Image (cartoon, rainbow, N blue to C red):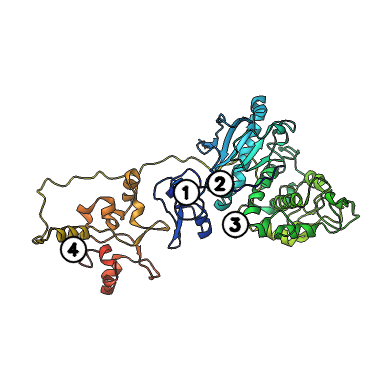
């Protein structure tokens, strides 16, 4: 295993600022972690408009380096897309990216046969499922993902253990590499509750299929473990108090306690916890696995136990000389049977259980999976782009252009200012779906056409939409938000309370009601 650290801060993915920042459901921390985003009015916005995120902006990022394989699309037409490696990637026979994180499949693995290539795709699919565990097409933890991308995290996929020594012939920007081999990949493994006939989201269905191997492969698939190690390394760098690979972190403290008096291989005092000759649930006999290694392994054991990835008769038997909390919850039959030290994760280590089960609500925990991968990622589907149906724009009847009512000012500059004022956009953010959008959001080009075609946008942003001829003196049809007013406001509401028109910006929004053009 390679747990090499690097600090190569850079901008985020090769996306426009709007695509990277907006409509991503970011909280403030996640927003500011993206190098081209800014937090304003309780929402995340692009600080670079429609420019590439690499153009900079407010928030984190900056500096040299950058994502690996930045120009390669990893997912096309609902499946993993493999590419011929670019120059400098001599160890690889094929490469791809998972939401920007690079995968390098060795030359031997890619050339071997179709079975090896199918396993490589399985590995990529599992990686997708761990990054987007709820399969909604959006990474679960953008802060965590950004750290992996920015710091050159790489998944290395050799054919055999011997082939793994052919690593390293890749760009210097690779900062952290983790191996998971074709030789240890098992598609269709019984590790996944889904593959053994249970509902991976319904824990109540797991106990009934502990010994069911019909239709699944009883061999263990190491793919989830190795990718989990890579992700845990990033979590330890981002949130060291929680996940640092030492007995001083919250995870490390909890893991050390699970050992009881069973000892560790690297301390030469290991006792098999399933022998009932010590009291403890986690003890690793590997003499090369030091404190940091033990913590990373323990985080994986706890996490995969929580999602049911060890809760089979075979799995619990295989792990018993190292881990005895493979049964997730109280009330489930504890496996392996007849082992005194075996406990549920929930009872054996409440601290670990809490750390790995808080997967959706707390910062520092969202990177963790809640569903055991089965290698069948369905989240990032390519939906057909449907052009908005727009009514044909009817050209005005060929009447002569009517001069403005009233004589123009003798001062031409005043006239220009008056005309400009009459066609002002509202300064307030309007309601678009569940979001609040300023008129700058309209943008340009095809984006402008599409957004201005939405109901009421032209009346709220006549100048931005180029519709001054029709809406320069009209009320906005949109709901809008006035600063320090704790509700949405409409021009109908303004018409019922003249005092609204005294608030700066309301007259430009409700032009007819407030007599803006009079």
Q: Which residue is label 4 attached to?
A: 517
275 displayed left or right of 220:
right
For marks 1 and 2, the one nearer the N-term is: 1
In contact (CB < 8 Å): disc 1 and disc 3: no
274 displayed left or right of 51:
right
In contact (CB < 8 Å): disc 3 and disc 4: no
Q: Quadrant of residue 365?
A: bottom right
Numbered disc in front, either 2 or 4: 2
Numbered disc in front, either 2 or 3: 2
Measured in 3D between alpha carbons, the distance from the residue under mark 1 to the one under mark 2, in whole angstroms, is: 14 Å
Compared with residue 418, is residue 397 higher up or lower down, i.e. above or below?
Answer: above
Q: Secondary structure at mark 1?
A: helix
Residue drawn where x is 89% and y is 56% of the image: 278
Q: Which residue is label 3 attached to?
A: 360
Q: Quadrant of residue 80?
A: top right
Q: Which residue is label 1 attached to?
A: 20
Q: Secondary structure at mark 3?
A: loop
For marks 1 and 4, the one nearer the N-term is: 1
Q: Which residue is label 2 attached to?
A: 150
| Image spot of residue 337 (x, y percent) | 84, 51
Pick the quarter of the image with the N terminus: top right
């Amino acid at each position: 295993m390679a747990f090499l650290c690097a600090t190569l801060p850079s901008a985020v993915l090769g996306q426009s600022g709007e695509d990277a920042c907006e409509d991503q459901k970011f909280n403030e921390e996640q927003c500011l972690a993206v190098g081209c985003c800014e937090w304003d009015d309780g929402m995340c916005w692009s600080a670079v408009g429609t420019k590439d995120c690499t153009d900079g902006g407010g928030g984190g990022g900056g500096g040299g380096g950058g994502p690996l394989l930045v120009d390669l699309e990893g997912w096309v037409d609902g499946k993993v897309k493999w590419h011929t490696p670019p120059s400098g990637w001599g160890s690889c026979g094929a490469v791809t990216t998972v939401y920007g994180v690079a995968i390098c499949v060795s030359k031997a693995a890619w050339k071997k046969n179709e079975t090896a290539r199918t396993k490589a795709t399985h590995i990529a699919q599992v990686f997708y499922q761990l990054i987007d565990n709820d399969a909604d097409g959006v990474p679960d933890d953008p802060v965590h993902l950004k750290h992996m991308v920015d710091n050159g995290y790489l998944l290395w996929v050799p054919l055999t253990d011997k082939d793994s020594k052919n690593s390293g012939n890749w760009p210097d920007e690779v900062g952290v590499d983790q191996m998971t081999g074709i030789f240890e990949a098992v598609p269709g493994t019984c590790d996944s509750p889904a593959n053994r006939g249970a509902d991976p989201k319904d824990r109540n269905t797991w106990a009934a299929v502990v010994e069911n191997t019909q239709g699944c492969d009883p061999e263990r698939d190491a793919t989830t473990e190795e990718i989990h190690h890579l992700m845990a390394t990033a979590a330890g760098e981002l949130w060291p108090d929680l996940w640092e690979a030492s007995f001083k972190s919250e995870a490390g403290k909890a893991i050390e306690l699970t050992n009881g008096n069973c000892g560790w291989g690297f301390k030469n005092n290991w006792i098999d916890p399933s022998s009932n000759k010590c009291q403890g649930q986690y003890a690793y006999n590997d003499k090369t696995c030091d404190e940091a290694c033990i913590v990373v392994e323990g985080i994986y054991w706890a996490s995969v136990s929580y999602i049911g990835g060890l809760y089979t008769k075979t799995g619990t038997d295989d792990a018993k000389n190292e881990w005895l909390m493979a049964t997730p919850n109280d009330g489930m039959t504890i496996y392996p049977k007849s082992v005194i030290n075996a406990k549920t994760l929930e009872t054996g280590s409440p601290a670990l259980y809490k750390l790995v089960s808080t997967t959706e609500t707390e910062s520092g925990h969202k990177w963790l999976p809640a569903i055991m991968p089965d290698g069948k990622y369905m989240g990032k589907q390519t939906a057909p782009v449907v052009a908005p149906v727009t009514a044909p724009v009817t050209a005005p009847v060929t009447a002569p252009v009517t001069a403005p009512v009233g004589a123009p000012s003798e001062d031409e500059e005043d006239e220009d200012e008056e005309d400009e004022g009459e066609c002002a956009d509202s300064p307030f953010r309007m309601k678009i779906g569940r979001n609040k959008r300023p008129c700058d959001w309209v943008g340009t080009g095809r984006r402008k056409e599409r957004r201005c075609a939405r109901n009421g946008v032209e009346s709220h942003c006549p100048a931005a939409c180029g519709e001054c001829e029709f809406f320069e003196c009209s009320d906005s049809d949109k709901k809008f938000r006035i600063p320090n007013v704790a509700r949405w406001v409409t021009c109908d509401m303004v018409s019922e309370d003249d005092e609204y028109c005294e608030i700066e910006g309301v007259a430009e929004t409700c032009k007819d009601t407030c007599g803006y053009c009079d």
